[in-house]
Image (spheres, rainbow, N blue to C red):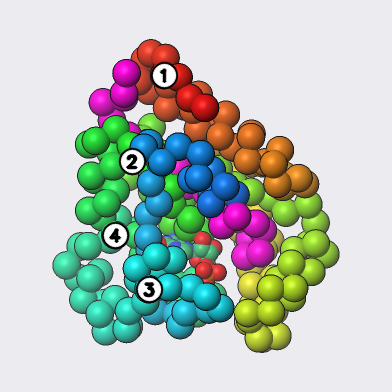
Amino acid sequence: MQAKRGLLVVISAPSGGGKTTVIHEILKTNDDLFQYSISATTRKPRGREQDGVDYYFISEEEFKRRIEASEFIEWARVHGHYYGTPKKPIDDAISSGKIIFLDIDVQGGLEVKKKYGDDALLIFIMPPSIEELEKRLRGRKTESDEEIARRLAAVPVEIEKSKYYDAVVVNNDLSETVRKVKDMIYKTYQAKAGGSRAHD
Ligand code: 5GP
């Protein structure tokens, strides 16, 4: 049995908090049901990121055109760049009963909750400590010192906003975090469907 309406799963975390890894681990487990919302951004690709896979990398001019054309369900300026969630895949996922993951910041998450209410589940992944976060950010060697400082400076505000999220999961151990997040998602989805659905 499949739910009539899908579910938007917003995963937020401070930069370097491990949310992208958590999302990828979960996406691998149920291809039929899970989808990923690819955001548009004006920042440049980092490391091995690919256009149309990790993000749609677009110019500021094109980004502003899309805002005007109401092509985003939400958009925000984060760490000096624009990021936005394209509307069409979200609408399609909801109407076809899919679970779609949004890797977006806390401002975006709260905006999604305002617009989508019970169709959205907001999960915040909390790093075990600021020291660990800084270590991971430096370890990935994809940002300049200035960029790292900017990302670390945003952490207290992000943590403050996480109190409005449906759940906060401390990421001490990746597989444990993945299990907890998956459980929450299936429970919420099943409750919405008003019935049971087997999962792996
Ligand atoms: P990064 O540049 O590290 O990929 O992402 C920086 C921040 O922007 C992260 O917190 C990420 O979740 C957030 N982000 C990515 N896409 C979107 C989006 O479409 N909307 C919003 N509001 N934030 C986004």
Disc 4 versus disc 2: distance between alpha carbons? 14 Å
Left or right placement of residue 135 versus residue 69 in this view: right
Left or right placement of residue 50 versus residue 148 in this view: left
Q: Nearer the viewer, mark 4 or mark 1?
A: 1
Disc 1 versus disc 3: distance between alpha carbons? 34 Å
Type of amino acid at the residue the image marks with label 2: Tyr
User: Is residue 49 within the magenta segment?
Assistant: no
Q: Of label 4 and label 2, which has the lower sequence position?
A: 4
Disc 4 versus disc 3: distance between alpha carbons? 14 Å
Residue beneath disc 3: 51
Find residue 116 and name its label. 2
Q: Give the magenta-colored segment's residue range.
A: 1-21
Q: Of label 1 and label 2, which has the lower sequence position?
A: 2
Disc 2 versus disc 3: distance between alpha carbons? 27 Å
Residue beneath disc 1: 197
Q: Report the residue at 64% width, 34% height from top.
A: 180
